[in-house]
Amino acid sequence: MSHDLVKHHLETRLVHDGTFRSEFGETSEALFLTQGHVYTSAEECEARFKDEVPGYIYARFSNPTVAMFEARMASLEGAEAARATATGMAAVTAALMGQVKAGDHVVAARALFGSCRYVIEEWLPRFGVATTLVDGKDLAAWKSAVRPNTKVFFLESPSNPTLEIIDIAAVAKIAHEVDAKLTVDNVFATPMQQRPLEMGADCVVYSATKHIDGQGRCLGGVILGSTQFINDHVKTPLRQTGPALSPFNAWVMLKGLETLAVRVERQTRTAGIVADALAGHPTLSKLIYCGRADHPQADIIKKQMTGGSTLIAFELKAGKEAAFRFLNALSLIRISNNLGDAKSLITHPATTTHQRFTSEERAEMGVGDGLVRLSIGLEHPDDLIRDIVAALEQA
């Protein structure tokens, strides 16, 4: 059987798919640091610009190293096509803006990362796109928010930072009934634990900065969907506006993908151990982990996720002051607003990722003053538990 016809397991595809080699036969993917390319003739140059023949033109449009990353991500996600971007928020913004024009309407879940809320609430309306925020868990709310000009639904699941879960298949069905398209930010679940395209989503976006890099080195993002979706809504806007992923960052992301399965599996297992150890701690008013049976949307998690993610959220009863004392008392876990890293990282959303919102808006999203978001790394769970418990005693 031809090698190309073999359907390899996911772990194998993470190492091999999308790779092409130069005439030097390198083992590791080549890093092509070039802005432009040359042509054998003016006719060939014209044909490439017209997309009549394959080939590279300019690094803002395409690059061999970036193309390998896009191909591997498409294989991982089960998508027909992918386009990489300079950051995760560039992916979110480009994916949404590429689907709408002035006069259109977008419906989004209320529980979102702060920058995503900005794009929905403030950026899109500047260009004549109306937006509505809903309780993403309430399917009736999605239906009620639909207008004749609704074009896009947008959600995170699990959400940042409250780990709220939305029924992706059900929301996709509602969107398609009104000829709208669903875009899902899947960064918390990673493609290892949730496949939104298989549930009916039209587009999936990632901050590759998180688990895909996984070691705190580079920024990056990626948009995935059908070939038609990418061609209709993403390809030209990215080409003309220029939020291009650098070839070096793409190469780093390729190296990250090789170990993604191993890292996420280990981090998820550790997250479950840590969450179970903290459940019921007297200083906590709430603990949320997608791998526990007491998660409010455990039934949906069982249906659409294959793992509990690497993130835990918990709230200290005594509010911000106690949360700060706790964070400052940690010796192993580092304070940082990033996540998905090999190192365990923790942040206080109310004063970082969601600081621009009013206290009422944060409360509506479930972001209390005592809430912290913990991203589990590759450390031994016993060391993490010991660090957290000791810090909670000082909080």
Image (spheres, rainbow, N blue to C red):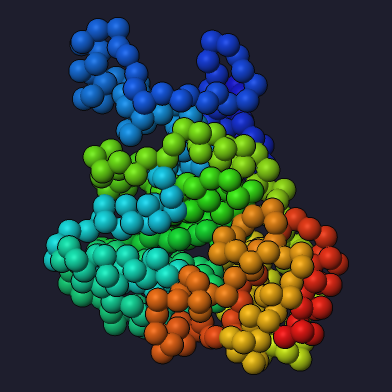
Where residue 339 appears, as percent x and y from the top left, is 59, 60
- As drawn, 104 above or below 257: below
Classify the position of the C terminus by image quarter.
Answer: bottom right
Q: Is residue 280 visible?
A: no
- Residue 112 sits in quarter: bottom left
Where residue 61 appears, as percent x and y from the top left, is 32, 33
Where residue 348 appears, as percent x and y from the top left, is 57, 75
Q: Nearer the viewer, residue 315 or 10?
A: 315
Q: Nearer the viewer, residue 136 or 96?
A: 96
Q: Is residue 207 left or right of residue 261?
A: left
**Residue at 43% across, 61% down:** 184
**Residue at 58% across, 45% down:** 217
- As drawn, 89 above or below 333: above
Q: Nearer the viewer, residue 286 or 370?
A: 370
Q: Is residue 313 left or right of residue 199?
A: right
Q: Is residue 135 left or right of residue 149?
A: right
Where residue 261 appears, as percent x and y from the top left, is 68, 48
**Residue at 40% across, 76% down:** 356
Q: Is residue 57 visible?
A: yes
- Residue 118 sits in quarter: bottom left
Classify the position of the N terminus by image quarter.
Answer: top right
**Residue at 14% across, 62% down:** 102
